[in-house]
Image (tube, helix red, strand yellow):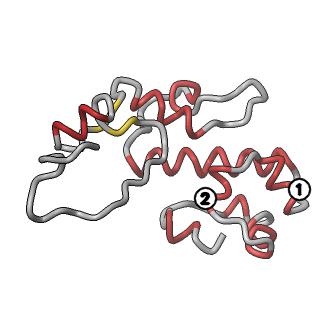
Amino acid sequence: MTDLLYTLPDFSTAEYTHLIPSFEKNGITVADLLTLDPIEIVKRCPLPLLDVRRFVKDVIRALQKDIGIRDTTHTSDDLFVPQDQQGVTAPVQACKHMMGRWSAISTLDNMVDKVLGGGIPTGYVTEVTGERYRDAPCGAGEQI
């Protein structure tokens, strides 16, 4: 958890002092908290499952508040921290409700957007590679 205070400098770790040494010893990062199921974290760190779930939930809340997708005046957690059937927070779903109205991000090149069906689809990790042509704009005289 050496990256926790770097990622969330204002996060209060006072009630989680019994968890953090085990996280550090086993190399658990903030990215692991967001991507792994708490059960997987408990398999790597022998800690109480409910404590790990509560810690993950609090980290997600702090991140949501930090980037502005959590309304600090609202009292209902269900609106901002969706949960799956097992009651484990699902950070991906929390972002989907924000991005649901956008289906693609424009590349700012009409030809490329047309080939991609409107732009780069949201909700996926997309890597764009290739050389940049300086002589002609992208798509001019070429088939993509």
Q: How many marks?
A: 2
Mark 1 highlights which residue?
A: 43
Q: Residue at x 48, y 31 (%)?
A: 96
Tell me the amino acid under the disc marked 2.
Answer: Ala
The disc placed on residue 31 is 2
Q: Earlier in the sequence, mark 1 or mark 2?
A: 2
Q: In what quadrant of the picture does the N terminus appear?
A: bottom right
- Circle 1 Cα neighbour tier, 10 Å, few/some/many (<14 / 14–19 / ≥20): few
Above or below — where is 58 with respect to 114?
A: below
Q: Quadrant of residue 50?
A: top right
Q: Report x, y in % for residue 63.
A: 50, 51
Q: Residue at x 61, y 60 (%)?
A: 30
Q: Residue at x 67, y 63 (%)?
A: 14
Q: In what quadrant of the picture does the C terminus appear?
A: top left
Q: Secondary structure at mark 2?
A: helix
Tell me the amino acid under the disc marked 1.
Answer: Lys
